[in-house]
Image: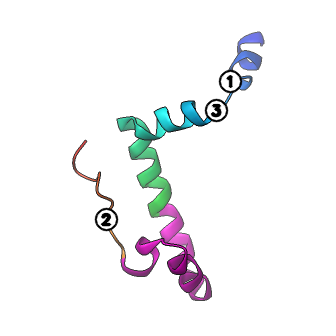
Amino acid sequence: MNSHEDNSSVLLTPDSILAFGLSPHGLHCLDLLRRRLTDEVSRFPALTGTLGERGCSSSAGGGVPAHEGTA
């Protein structure tokens, strides 16, 4: 049981988040999250404009991130 507690005490810092986000696995996870959020937002058309105004072009037109297919 202690190993469970050890895993839950991992400190998330900007550096550790950035390192994960830039790793191939992190990029894959972020892409899956983006796709899931895009699917969820498409169910609520009133939100699409709000996210588009904040720079989430994928919600408005299904944009492809620059890293996709390069990993």
Residue of label 2 = 64
Look at the picture and state if 37 lies above or below 44.
Answer: above
User: Which color mode does the image show?
Assistant: rainbow
Give the x, y percent position of residue 62. Answer: 36, 74
Q: Is residue 67 left or right of residue 57?
A: left
Q: Which residue type carries mark 1? A: Val
The span shown in magenta is 36-61
Say which quadrant the N terminus sits in: top right
Q: Going by the image, does 53 lie left or right of 7? A: left
Residue 43: image quadrant is bottom right
Query: Is 44 included in the stretch rendered in magenta?
Result: yes
Specify whether 1 is left or right of 15.
Answer: right
Disc 1 from disc 3: Cα separation: 9 Å
Secondary structure of the residue carrying tag 3 is: loop
In the displayed image of the protein, which residue is found farthest to the left?
70
Corner quadrant of residue 47: bottom right
Neighbour class for label 1 at 10 Å: few (<14), some, many (≥20)?
few
- Local crowd at mark 3 within 10 Å, few (<14), some, or many (≥20)? few
> Is residue 11 depicted above or below 35 in this figure?
above
Question: Residue drawn 69% across and 26% down?
Answer: 11
Contact? badges 2 and 1 (CB < 8 Å): no
Q: Does 6 appear above or below 28?
A: above
Amino acid type of the residue tagged 3 in the rendering? Thr
Picture coordinates of residue 32 (x, y %)? 44, 53
Depth-wise, is mark 1 or mark 3 nearer the camera?
Answer: 3
Name which residue lies at 33% across and 60% down: 65
Look at mark 1 in the image and give the residue it sits on.
Answer: 10
Q: Which residue does the numbered mark 3 point to in the structure image?
A: 13
